[in-house]
Amino acid sequence: MIKLNKDSVSLSIENHTFNLPFLWLRDNCQCDECRITETEEKQFLLHTVPSDISPTSVEEIDNSIQILWPDNHQSIIPISKIIESQKSRYPEHKNWEKNFTPPKHDWKNFLNNDAAALKGLNDFVEYGVIILENAPKESNSLELLSKRLGPIHETLFERIHNVSVTGHVYNVAHTSKGLPPHNDFASYKYQPSVQALHMLENECEGGESVIVDGWELVEDLRKDHPKYFEILCNFTIPFREFDEDNETFAEAPLIKCDTNGKVESFRFSNQLMQMIDPSKKGLQDFYMAYHEVSKRVYDHKYRSVFRLNGGEALIVASLRVLHARESFVPNGKRHLQDAYYVYDNAANNIVLLSK
């Protein structure tokens, strides 16, 4: 049922009423003149019509809204398109249950079987983390994951980074010490959004992997301390990472939300955080908020601890899930490789595989 109003059209479908502005109706015409049928790209340019445009007539015919405009252009908008625009393209995020461990999937099936890949990617989007079992133990096997995760996202450092105890250390990851919860490259304004950590060999005692659900953590912070949450969304912090040949630096808040207030990024790297200008306004309030969020990062409620064995790859949505490593005894071989990918590419593969 449709109703013509002063500057919009009301459409009632299944106990829901949409208020469709005239400019929205003109902009969303689906005819061949306004859209390229094969690619669904819009050709119509909104500024070519008056901002106060008003239809000559509006009708509901054959489950479509048909609008005649003063220039005699006839717009057709299928009602199914309007309903479709409300649906989410991706699975909803899920919080981790008590004693959560990452969903496990077979490496070969994930790469070679579309149904298995779809299940794995759905789990990845829902929980922010999966483990691929029975992975090759050959170096640079992470290149193969591009089939499902998209091209590797290169940084200034190595394309595929080797992590092992070495005599030359520029990062605590290259020691046997514990590695605190963090996401990589907080020192980039646009951090890598997916990280794959591929264990080639793990013969050492200790060194359990730790992951933290950062989004659940900060959502609980929002409920318990809304003022702290707001501070961490707005107070920018300097981060730096470097070696002999590279330098990276960024200033950004710990929490970033989308326009609907939904958390889309939790940037946390205590080790890369630099000295904050002591004259900066709100410093005391920031440190109270930072103290609280740091305490929650180490709360067992939000973390999962497990051993990543040789031939397993941990994949994390790194703007949501922090990763860490407990200390270990270097009494055997331990070699891990990691690489970065783009979250959008992984999520969009869900749409492709669902067709």
Image (spheres, grey):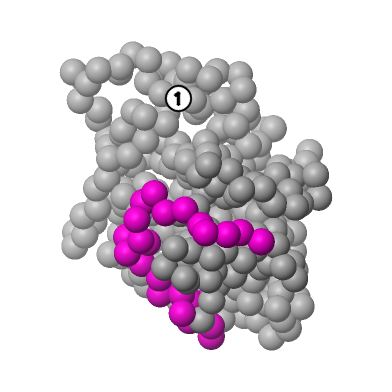
Q: Inspect this view and state whether residue 69 appears.
A: yes
* 31 in magenta: no
Residue 221's place in the image compared with 245, above or below, is above
Name the residue: 52% across, 36% down. Answer: 261
In the image: residue 236, left or right of residue 196: left
- The residue that label 1 is drawn on is 230
Q: Give the total number of marks visible in the rendering.
A: 1
Estimate the x, y position of residue 85 in percent, counting from the top left: 62, 59
Estimate the x, y position of residue 341 in percent, counting from the top left: 47, 67
Of the pair 317 and 167, the residue shown nearer to us? 317
Name the residue: 19% across, 62% down. Answer: 245
Q: Quadrant of the C terminus?
A: bottom right
Looking at this view, name the residue that lies furthest to the top. Answer: 284
The segment highlighted magenta reads 33-59
Estimate the x, y position of residue 71 in percent, counting from the top left: 41, 68
Give, as a three-letter code, the residue at label 1.
Glu
Q: Identify the element where label 1 is drawn.
A: helix
In the image: residue 277, left or right of residue 89: left
Of the pair 95 and 107, the residue shown nearer to us? 95
Give neighbour class at mark 1: few <14, some 14-19, many 20+ (Cα, 10 Å).
some
* 48 in magenta: yes
Magenta span: chief secondary structure: loop
Name the residue: 65% across, 54% down. Answer: 86
Estimate the x, y position of residue 353 in percent, counting from the top left: 68, 77
Q: Inspect this view and state whether residue 181 appears.
A: no
